[in-house]
Image (tube, rainbow, N blue to C red):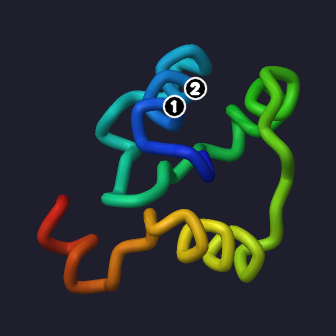
Amino acid sequence: MSDADFAELHAFAEAAGIPRRGFHGDHYDVPEEYYTAMVDLGAVPTPSRELVRRLRAAGLRLSPAQRRAAE
């Protein structure tokens, strides 16, 4: 997750080898086998409620309808 912008998020995911198809409008679904590598690259494990709070605060959180439209 990026609390700055989607460009930062996409660049991080690409560097970690996460395919763009894992992007769901405002976040990436990350397969469990990538977890350790993501943390090693600097990802910070964040509870889902905190993730949503940060996305909303940054203006990056999409509504469910917006996420469906983005897919």
Q: Is residue 38 left or right of residue 36?
A: left
Q: Residue at x 76, y 39 (%)?
A: 35
**Element type at mark 1:** helix
Residue 65 picture quarter: bottom left
Whether tag 2 and tag 1 are in contact, CB under 8 A, the answer is: yes
Q: Residue at x 47, y 44 (%)?
A: 5
Amino acid identity at mark 1: Glu
Q: What separation in Å lies between label 2 and label 1 (alpha carbons)?
A: 6 Å
Residue 8 lies, in percent from the top left, at 51, 31
Amino acid identity at mark 2: Phe
Q: Can you identify the residue that label 1 sits on?
A: 8
Residue 41 lies, in percent from the top left, at 79, 21
Residue 10 picture quarter: top left
Q: Is residue 30 left or right of residue 37?
A: left
Q: Is residue 42 above or below residue 55?
A: above
Local crowd at mark 2 within 10 Å, few (<14), some, or many (≥20)? some
The circle on residue 12 is 2
